Image (cartoon, grey):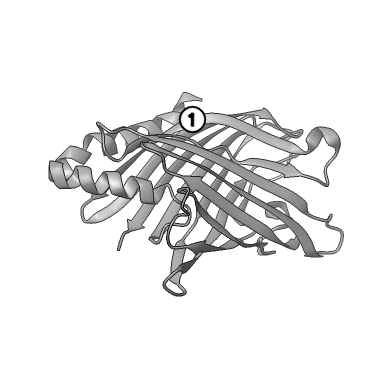
Amino acid sequence: MYKHIFPFAVFFAIALSGQAQAQDADSASSSAAALARQAQNPVADMISVPFQLNWNFDTGPLDKNQQILNIQPVLPFTLNEDWNLVTRTIVPLISQPAFAPGQDRENGIGDINFTAFLSPKKPSSGGWIWGVGPALIMNTSTDDRLGQGAWSLGPSAVFLKMPGNWVVGGLISNVWSISEDEGRPDVNQMLLQPFINYNFPKHPGRYLTFSPVITSNWEADSGNKWTVPLGLGIGQIMKLGKQHVNMQLAAFYNVVRPDDASTWQIRAQLVLLFPK
């Protein structure tokens, strides 16, 4: 177990220790604090390119490790003085372990997920930031074992507030299949991601995060519908050379999970930030 955690921990520790050397202290503090709040807002008016590595342990009947690298470019578009359209595309690169003796590991692209949020440029009078729009899962997997074999569509919404040093909110979507490959089951699934971030005032740009990705497969048997992970992470905004980045490391344990789903997960994330 520790040999898998060690590279992530070392990479993160080196990045944190090098932050103070990379920037002027005053300007770095101001920039990092502001960027942290932007980076924690899913509908911020800022281009970002996250690279998120999910390492899922004890996956499948043989309890093997699964790796998924999600490349997730976020592109905001100005519609008028009051509204933005914020798009997020998730391209999963999957290394799927064998599920039966003699079966090979399968590597390739999974189903691409596209979401577009229509979002007001300014928060509401109560301080709420929100966005709504469609979520589309495309049938793009390079192998049947890497995807659902269906095109799926449904609504998605995000909402959050930023009181003091906190960022609190959630994202929810539900999609239904509109077209399936022959022999593949219907899709009816929900994704719910609450997030609670605490930004350390004495360490601008550093934050704790609670952001589990909870899913429900409504088509599954009653005991296999839900995946509910619990865990925490730590993140840091910094500059690597001239590039603003958001680095994050988190670990989760699946307290509720379907049969043969992974027991726990490490999530390591590097986000390239392009503030205006």
Q: Position of residue 20 (x, y in %)?
A: 17, 38
Q: Is residue 116 above or below residue 233?
A: below
- As shown in the figure, which amino acid type bears the numbered disc 1? Leu
Q: Residue at x 23, y 34 (%)?
A: 17
Q: Residue at x 73, y 40 (%)?
A: 99
Q: Residue at x 61, y 32 (%)?
A: 229
Q: Position of residue 159 (x, y in %)?
A: 54, 49
Q: Position of residue 152 (x, y in %)?
A: 73, 61
Question: 28 or 37, which lies in front?
Answer: 37
**Picture quadrant of residue 180:** bottom right
Q: Quick one: which residue is furthest to the front in this view?
A: 125
Q: Position of residue 84 (x, y in %)?
A: 47, 67
For label 1, the residue is: 232
Q: Is residue 183 above or below residue 79?
A: above
Would residue 158 appear left or right of 144 to someone viewing this image?
A: left
Q: Is residue 247 visible?
A: yes
Judging from the image, what secondary structure is the residue with disc 1 in?
strand
**Picture quadrant of residue 157:** bottom right
